[in-house]
Amino acid sequence: MAKAHANSWEVTDEFWSRVEPLVPQPARDPDKQYKRAAGAGRPTKPPRLVFEAIMYVLRTGCQWKALPAERFGSASAIHQKFMLWSKAGFFENLWRAGLAEYDDFEGVAWRWQSIDGAMFKAPLAQEAVGRNPTDRGKKGSKRHLLVDGRGVPLSLVVTGANAHDVTQLEAVLASCMIKRPTPKQRRSKHLCADAGYRGKNAMKIILAHGYIPHVVGRKSEAERKKRDPQKKARRWVVEACHGWFNRFRKLLVRYEKLEHTFLALNHLAAAIIALRKISLPVNIIYG
């Protein structure tokens, strides 16, 4: 009997049609001498198989060496391709393309945005890592997110767990992956943040980027909600987005040693989150 739907790590034809045009094409280094002619030797792995293997690792959280050889072949060859694609900016481009499609179909909810950071364990990390103040000083990292009104990630920065949220405010706001088009009518945009973003310098940065700041502590936020039950909560979407990232098991605990490889996996997850927010007649990504 046929499956009702694909596994969360399987790449559907609809998803692959969005990914394939962005896959980096192999190119030879003009300054290097090669023993074999172009195209000679063992054929390279099909890009779709490589991408599906990366999806398998991201979804299941398994070690690269634990990839099922009967389906994907050499795990080291898969990892080598992943490293090359990461350095070529492929995953970042995929996230940007996913945001562009989301903007075309749904429209980015620019008016109310939210920002926050979340810490996680990073026992093997060698870059962008620091002592986690909430985990007895063990090694950890932190993901800083800026999301739109629906919780779709617009900006992502990874630092050590000991980097305070407010110190990364400028970096997060400045690295937004998609530019807001100039509206026909002047419309304000709001930034919701918790008490970790208080301070004169933080206010200057928020205002300099054209936001109306809403920096409120959790307790004050709860009290406001009690006084006015009709008041709509806004900041929770960024916490929900961190939860969506944690559904990708490879990101729940960071085992990637290098910053660029861990960022690449985060960018892939961000692209999937953006694409899943599009109302399409066919579900291109499951799980």
Image: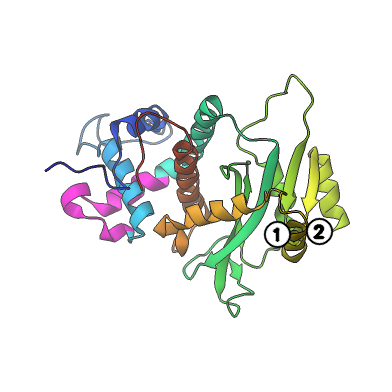
- Dominant SS of magenta comes to helix
7 versus 119 height, above or below: above
Comparing 235 with 284, the one in front is: 235
Left or right, 104 with reference to 90: right
- Report which quarter residue 219 is drawn in: bottom right
Q: Amino acid at mark 1?
A: Asp
Region rendered in magenta:
64-83
Instruction: Give the x, y percent position of residue 225.
Output: 73, 57
Instruction: Give the x, y percent position of residue 70.
Output: 15, 51
Disc ID at residue 165: 1
Comparing 40 with 125, the one in front is: 125
Image quarter of the N terminus: top left
| Residue 26 can be seen, yes or no | no
x 41%, y 30%: residue = 280
Give the structural element (helix, strand or loop) at label 2.
Answer: loop
The residue indicated by pointer 2 is 198
Q: Residue furthest top?
A: 184
Give the mark nearest the N terminus, 2 or 1: 1
- Examine the structure image and report whether residue 87 is included in the region drawn in magenta: no
150 versus 145 height, above or below: above
| Residue 126 can be seen, yes or no | yes
